[in-house]
Image (cartoon, rainbow, N blue to C red):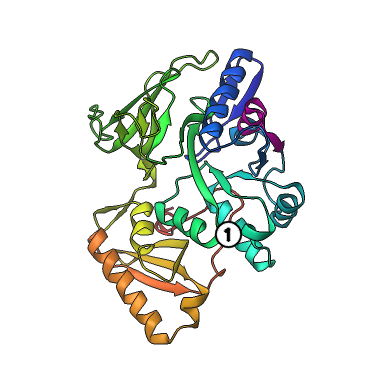
Amino acid sequence: MVRVHASSGTTGTPTVVGYTRRDLATWSDLVARILAMAGVGQGSVVQVAFGYGLFTGGFGLHYGIERVGAQVIPAAAGNTRRHLKLIRDLGTTHIVCTPSYALYLCETAEEMGIDLREDTELRTGCFGGEPSSDGMREHMEERFGLAGYDNYGLSELIGPGVSGECEARAGLHIFDDHFYAEVIDPDTGEVLPPGEEGELVLTNLTREALPALRYRTRDITRLEEAPCSCGRTQTRMARVSGRTDDMLIIRGVNVFPSQIEHAFLEADGTSPNYQIIVDREGAMDTIEVKIEVTEQMLSDEMKDLRRLQEDIRDHLSNTLGLSTHVTLVEPGSLPRSEGKATRVIDRRKQQDQ
């Protein structure tokens, strides 16, 4: 074993993982594959906005960028204004980060008067570390001209490099020569057929330092075995829609944050910045969704805001099957993150302690 990394600690205590020299070479090759599918190659300038340390994102993407023959800017996490200066001064073409940080970066550029389309060469984001919805991706493409390509991985299997999107963006190609994928019913453990949604289970086939058999990822997805329109024949996984441990149980109803995001982003005038607050009044669970509106919506008449609020509330009620309090807030008023976004605040846990 020649190197140690660790998971980000999403589910609690980080999991420490090791790599042999061959594991590191395999990892670089796998990350090079996902980058190539996202259009990265010789002549690309790729800026890494993940932390360099125990978390696998920074080093994993860094060596993959070098492996594919592109130029790497190891900017690391934090200091968004410096990131924008580097993007403009060094001709960055691709940014590697979480989708929520990409959104924050774009908004900061707008605040600084930087037009990403006109003032920079940045056109593509290689996103990992957290799920992103179609609505968030469409918002970034339409408003800022940043096309997003998702990739997937987890430290326990190798890090980033398990799967990635091609130019068709019709699911993430799993590298079947290194990983065997299954989807199971998270309650019974039963293996589900292709097309059915459940929990992703992975076995790594070539890892030396930490071989894992049927590792339960807790990520919710479905598998597709038909060849992709791009011509690749690997198994594809749908973009992760949530995690089994992200599920909220509110008055007996199972709710995933991704359901809420998908529902309100269908309404014009909202942005992908939101926060879900779960609380308890007496014996009754309550849920409030705070959603930032766009500047244009904010400038409209108050009756338009009330109508938007009522439409979102009704849509969430129909989608979730329970009443939801919706609060529309000004652009930029909700907290931003330079890593993984905190979307849910569950105050019931504090009351139960």
Residue 120, x across and y down, in percent? 68, 54
On the rendered structure, is 79 left or right of 131? right
Magenta-tinted stretch: 60-72
Question: Residue 63 in magenta?
Answer: yes
Res 279 quadrant in image: bottom left
Residue 166, x across and y down, in percent? 46, 36
On the rendered structure, is 322 left or right of 81? left
Query: In the image, what residue occupies the spot 38% across and 36% down?
Result: 218
The residue at which mark 1 appears reads as 336
Mark 1 lies on a secondary structure that is loop
Principal SS element in the magenta part? Answer: helix
The residue lying toward the viewer, choosing from 80 and 115, is: 115
The residue lying toward the viewer, choosing from 112 and 287, is: 112
Q: Residues within 10 Å of mark 1 (few under 14, many from 20)?
A: some
Query: In the image, what residue occupies the spot 42% across and 54% down?
Result: 349
On the rendered structure, is 52 left or right of 10? right
Query: In the image, what residue occupies the spot 39% across and 41% down?
Result: 240
Query: In the image, what residue occupies the spot 63% across and 65% down?
Result: 110
Question: Residue 103 in magenta?
Answer: no
Res 81 quadrant in image: bottom right
Residue 24, x across and y down, in percent? 61, 19
Res 26 quadrant in image: top right
Q: Does residue 51 lie above or below 303 as drawn?
A: above
The residue lying toward the viewer, choosing from 104 and 52, is: 104
Q: Which quadrant of the figure contains the N terminus?
A: top right
Q: Tag 1: residue type?
A: Arg
Residue 311, x across and y down, in percent? 30, 73
Q: Does residue 129 lie above or below 64 as drawn?
A: below
Q: How many callouts does the rendering have?
A: 1
